Amino acid sequence: MNIAIFAGGDSSEYIVSMRSAEQIRHWLDKAGHTCFLVEVKGSAWTIHHGEARIPMDKNNMGFESGEGRVVFDFAWNIIHGTPGEDGKLQGCFDMLGIPYNSSNHLSSALTFNKYTCKSFLKQHHVLTPEASLVKKNVETDLEAIAEMVGLPCFVKPNSGGSSFGIAKVVKFEELQQALEDAQKEDNEAIVERYIKGTEVTCGLMKTGEGFTVFPVTEIISKNEFFDYEAKYTEGKAEEITPARIDAELARKCQELAMKIYDLTDSAGIIRVDFIIKGNQLYFLELNSIPGMSRESIIPKQVKSLGLNMEDVLQKVIDHALEMHRVSLR
């Protein structure tokens, strides 16, 4: 098939997305597809075709080349942050009838908004650290928030997935600055209770054959927490797969990840992050477009399971095409 790999985006995660796209292209090429990188930046959607840079025709997801008109059969969305992870691009694909690899627009919007996702899952009895939402330019009682979540605490942009703008706040006097830094990334920030424990993450996917759940990974950051530097700088974090937790706890983690996948109506490959305290699993966030670069966790989990990435991606494509056919009936 002709596959458009959508990468870039309008957030600080642009570079991470472009790295992921190169890996996705490598695997899809091995799977036998013809791939075109589509770089998205604002309203400019540019196709990388050899040395040429060609504007995409957004009306029908195609472009004119020297060999004639090229139309895409499938879209692989690997944009971390907006517009690929918050549902905007998925809405566009749905309107144009283009099948794609990721969760739909509603599911993506839900899971990209940390506070909304945590609130939704709490209604379904999923444990998650207490958190408060702080909106930019809206007067907020920081003392009341600090009393509710306790110190230390984490301050995070409400929407975003690559640890930009995240801070661990130890003293109350640091809270205002941390919020201002987070709100450079997003107009909303969350102040979340700090839970000291073991950080783990579980990748998974679902097709017509059921779930494929990858081994749980344990994350040990050499920084104060698993920030952007720790994620993408070699030697700044240990990512141990499978995690050094007992088999029963690992099974509980995988089962909870599957429950969350279904509750949020997720699709394609996702990654769910947890913190373990004692025998309790606390949900942190869901990554609907997880990283796929050389440094990323999902490819390592897939390898640990003894699978090839090109086969895994092909299963995602086959299932998405089947779901697309069903929707047209």
Image: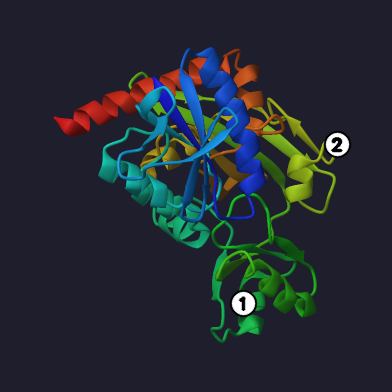
| Colour scheme of the rendered structure | rainbow
Image point (76%, 78%), residue name: 172
Please tell me whether residue 210 is drawn above or below residue 327 in the rendered image: above
Image point (35%, 51%), residue name: 106
What number is the disc on residue 37?
none
Per the model, the C-alpha gap separating discs 1 and 2 is 35 Å
Residue 76 figure quarter: top left
Residue 317 coordinates in the image, percent (x, y): 40, 24
Farthest residue toward the front? 66
Q: Secondary structure at mark 1?
A: helix
Q: Secondary structure at mark 2?
A: loop
Q: Looking at the image, is mark 1 or mark 2 nearer the viewer?
A: 2
Decide if residue 307 is on the left or right side of residue 4.
right
Query: What residue is disc 1 on?
Result: 145
Image point (20%, 33%), residue name: 327
Pointer 2 local density, CA inside 10 Å: few below 14, some 14–19, many at least 20: few
Q: Amino acid at mark 2?
A: Gly
Pointer 1 local density, CA inside 10 Å: few below 14, some 14–19, many at least 20: some
Q: Nearer the viewer, residue 112 or 51?
A: 51
Please tell me whether residue 39 is drawn above or below residue 4 in the rendered image: below
Query: What residue is disc 2 on?
Result: 235
Q: Nearer the viewer, residue 157 or 60?
A: 60
Residue 97 figure quarter: top left
Please tell me whether residue 97 is drawn above or below residue 321 in the rendered image: below
